[in-house]
Amino acid sequence: MKSLLCTLCAPFFLSIQSADAVTSSQNATTAFSYNELTNPASKDPKQWAKVKKVQIGWGSTDTRYKKEEPALSTQKQLKLHGWRGERLSAQFVVSTPEELPALTFELSDLKHTGDSKSLIAKDQLQSGFVRYVMTDELNKDKKGGCGLRPNTAAYDSSLVADPIDHLTASLDLEGCTTQGGWVTVAVPEDCKPGRYVGTVKVSDANNELATLKLELEVNKRTLPQPEAWSYHLDLWQNPYATARIYNVEPFSEAHFEAMRPDMELYARAGGKSITTSIMHKPWNGQTYDHFESMVTWLKKADGTWYYDYTVFDKWVEYMMGIGITKEITCYSLVPWHLSFQYFDQASNSFKSIQTKPGAPEFEQHWLGMLQSFAKHLKEKGWFDITHISMDERPMEAMIETMKVIRKADPDFKVSMAGVLHPEIEGDLDSYSIAMRYKWSEEQKAQRKEAGKVSTFYTCCEEAYPNTFTFSAPAESEWLGWFAANMELDGYLRWALNSWVKSPLQDSRFTAWAAGDTYMIYPGGRSSIRYERLISGIQAYEKIRLLKEEYARKNDQSSLRKLNKILAQFNEETLTKTPAEETVRKANALLQQL
């Protein structure tokens, strides 16, 4: 049986490796060094005629600077404010009328101005060039980004600043080009409060071009490390996409090693949930790399069933080793396409059954597996953190599915992302609802009292706020503030890394607005929108800690000020005031508390 099962795994692996093999091979090498696509936008000679020499200065993390337009920033000094333990970001920008060979930049230590022995070492600072990726736009009605896009020419396409490339040591710039650089400071938890000063030195192959001053005011308050954050961040991981991009066998040692930097980005944001697939194509192959089953389903010749959890175990153990330990989500008993694949030993072939919740065949197919799965999870010590999960399924289907789950083991936890259904809300241990729906105060209180997780999500339906590659960067941060205002536990996004064919060059997809399918880039590259998402989560954690402090001290005045800030984070305000304005003002007020 063991040798047969090893053979059975091969078709799953081969289906990934054989798909677009040429692209896989190319992506495996370009994951660490790559060229951007040609910019479809032309440069305006009149604009560039005003730029007499290379311009270098601090810019704004709210801005995706256009490659073809000059950014005339002359600000040579920037001051940041943060707590101990916080991750802070800054962006500088270079605009050059002439060619610049081998552009580089170098960070110094940040030294305490009042204590020569205290510093934030430069190894606590990360940096990278802000690279350009192809994007598109919302649908023509501007109400969202859902729907197939077989004809990309029907949508305006442009290069947009988004990937943060820490792997490229230098860049050659053409004349009349703008290029951003990103700096992130990981403030140590134990650093001395006060003012720190350092520099960013920008050079090309021939000259030192500019020295920018970076000042940091460190608050006495401390933000805990991401693994201790309460914010429930659930960004679905796709290991099948990483297997293609890095051209490795899925779930091999080479695969785990190659994608470690990518999954560490998730842990750095405080990720809480491990995404697993317990059946073939739970979302009907909606991504470029569809999800295979991490559980092998085998119907033996005598009609009995055998389930192998080797891949599931390897994936969960790997992710736990990276630090994702709170929750395992298992998709899905109710896939979008109600087809269930298994290997039939009698015919030595893969077969599928078509059935739906409520049908006898549905229960027959799932009951034995769930009972076996429950036993396995208990043996591994994972049962209490595992959720049988569904995504955007009708209430009637959920009710029938719950019956099967409870029959298999009444203590199974269940989670769902989708419409708010009061009829089944009490049965869901973790429930993420679309942003347009709202929990009642009573529902939130009851769920919190019961220790249940209540979050919200955005997808292709929300024009804004969102995390598309063309979305305003501040919208990603706005989401964390919104969760704090609504007193929700966190946020769900359906795709951390469901990469498109060439994710470093082109974020467009055949379905949905560009960037909808992923937030990070191969090679462990972060993005502008991902760093801003982290900033919003950090704001949420600060607010939580301040509220706890004010409650202990009965400081009603400070609590009212804080709630007044939070009240601005709602959809109605967002229709009138850009996210960057609301976020900027809120951060300024938060610094004063």
Image (tube, rainbow, N blue to C red):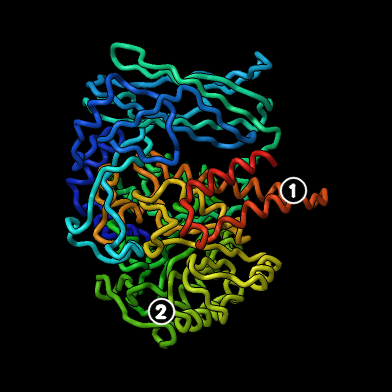
Q: Which residue is mark 1?
A: 558
- Mark 2, Cα crowd under 10 Å, few <14 / some 14-19 / many 20+, is some
Does the rendering let one see residue 1? no
* Residue 181 vs residue 245, the one in the foreground: 181
Q: Position of residue 101 (x, y in %)?
A: 25, 19
Q: Rounded to the nearest whole Å, what is the CA distance between mark 2 and mark 1?
A: 57 Å
Does the rendering let one see residue 374? yes
* Residue 172 vs residue 230, the one in the foreground: 172
Left or right of 68? Residue 225 is right
Please tell me which residue is depicted at 27% across the width and 70% down the height of the picture.
350
**Which amino acid is tagged 2?**
His
The mark tally for this picture is 2
Name the mark nearer the viewer: 2 or 1: 1
* Residue 216 vs residue 427, the one in the foreground: 216
Above or below for 496 versus 73: below
**Which amino acid is tagged 1?**
Ser
Please tell me which residue is depicted at 43% across the width and 46% down the height of the picture.
473
Q: Position of residue 509 (x, y in %)?
A: 26, 56
Above or below for 440 versus 580: below
Check whether the beta carbons of the residues at disc 2 and disc 1 lie within 8 A of each other: no
- Mark 1, Cα crowd under 10 Å, few <14 / some 14-19 / many 20+, is some
Decide which of tag 2 and tag 1 comes sooner along the chain: 2
**Quadrant where the C terminus lies?**
top right
Q: Which residue is mark 2?
A: 365
Helix, strand or loop at disc 1?
helix
Please tell me which residue is depicted at 45% across the width and 25% down the height of the picture.
75
Task: Looking at this view, name the residue that lies furthest to the right.
Answer: 553
